[in-house]
Image (cartoon, rainbow, N blue to C red):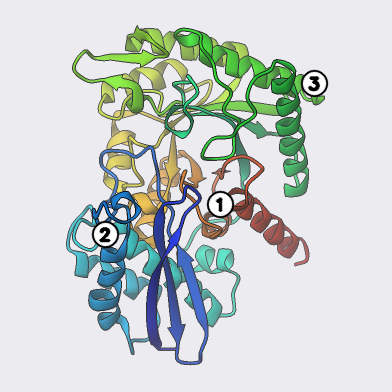
Amino acid sequence: MKIRQIQAYQILDSRGIPTIKCVLTLHDGMRMSACVPSGASTGAAEAYELRDGDTKRFFGKSVTKAINNIHTIIAPELLEKELSCADVDSTLLKLDGTHNKSNLGANALLAVSMAAVRAQACVEQKELYDFIHQAFLFQHKALPSCMFNIINGGMHANNGLSFQEFLIVPKNKQRIIDILDCASTIYHTLKNLLKEQKLSTNVGDEGGFAPCFSKVGFENEQEALSLIARALQQAGYSNSDVGMSLDVAATSFYDAEKNIYNVSGRAVTREELLTFYQQCVDNFSLLSIEDGITESDWQGWQEMNQQLGDKTAIVGDDLFVTDTKKIQQGISLDAANAVLIKPNQIGTVSETVQAIKCAQKAGYKVVISHRSGETNDSFIADLAVGCGADYIKAGAPVRGERVAKYNRLLEIEQALSSI
């Protein structure tokens, strides 16, 4: 089936910031679309997100330049060509010609790449997760465990918390509906607990609560973990039922000039940070720590993995930015044992798949992740199932752009159970 038309236009993400929606139309009239997310906390080596810079519109965040690249550069090369998502990605990479997608913009490339994958799955009359599993030759497909961000901090909330995400991970639930029941129960129990303590129940970018804390240093982060532990207990769960995880986003509060971390008004060293992580692992049985060390400190990552890697997953996000070369570097240095995967960090579905396969080959845990600026597009849910990811991280069990991913997992589970 040949591509008849590629159209793109500007929509708003969950933070009210412009992003791209791309609609790919085939000659039989079938239309498939894809929407691109955007991150607030980004790694320095992420693929380039092209924005207009015109401060008169959307504070310079418009994406009409990227959309124009789709219409004037990308579309002419793909129209009237037989649909092949592999060929589409190859053409996209050739047209851009840069590793970080700084020519056409990673947001422009990913919009077309995702739409093409969806369209080919439809042409072949396959569910998206099945197509991803078969077309990209993954060894197995499976429903992932879910990581729910229920307290926000860092760049996702202005509330005194330096760490970015405090998450819960239901461990002993086999069905997605039971996982969601568990997460929702704990989430609303935490809300009631915050009310009792007269703490704010406002939410951050990803739907987690953003209570304001005014303590110093690690006391804030300790308080957040303790609140979640109490919510677990009040909801009738134990550590054996539900795990806890951290997304620290340490680069966001790292002072490179002084080589220290500013945690809630207190300057701490890498060693002090690692000691705190050890305490958290011991006291709260943490399942994972994401971006616990700044992305530029490979030695620090090695030390963290050596000290804690046998007890918890050491997840690289800003460290790896879904880049196969960086993941390979991390493997060779034994700097982590898990990777976060975000398609918009690299720019095309094919490159995302390469990164996943590289990590899986090395025995890394794979976490498919949303971004803080999300849309209702549920592509990552199908990606997580199709590639057999260990986890998916899509935010709190609230807000439409977050639950769209979890609700899609419900649909996939129903489809798989009927086979």
Q: Callout 3: few (<14), some (14-19), or many (20+) C-alpha neighbours within 10 Å?
A: some
Horizontal relation, residue 277 to residue 400: left or right: left
Residue 239 seen in the figure: no
Q: Which residue is mark 1?
A: 388
Give how far across and how far down residue 107 sits, in percent: 34, 59
Residue 122 seen in the figure: yes
Quarter of image, res 243 = top right
Q: Secondary structure at mark 3?
A: helix
Q: Residue at x 32, y 25 (%)?
A: 294
Q: CA distance from mark 2 to mark 3?
A: 47 Å
Q: Secondary structure at mark 2?
A: loop
Q: Which residue is mark 3?
A: 234
Residue 79 vertical placement versus 390 (above, below)? below
Q: Which residue is mark 2?
A: 105
- Disc 2 marks which amino acid? Gly
For this rendering, which residue is in front, 71 or 94? 71
Q: Secondary structure at mark 1?
A: loop
Residue 400 vertical placement versus 209 (above, below)? below
Residue 31 vertical placement versus 105 (above, below)? below
Horizontal relation, residue 184 to residue 262: left or right: right
Give how far across and how far down residue 284 sits, in percent: 62, 16
Q: Callout 2: few (<14), some (14-19), or many (20+) C-alpha neighbours within 10 Å?
A: many
For this rendering, which residue is in front, 120 or 134? 120
Q: Residue at x 39, y 85 (%)?
A: 3
Residue 216 vertical placement versus 84 (above, below)? above
- Disc 1 marks which amino acid? Gly
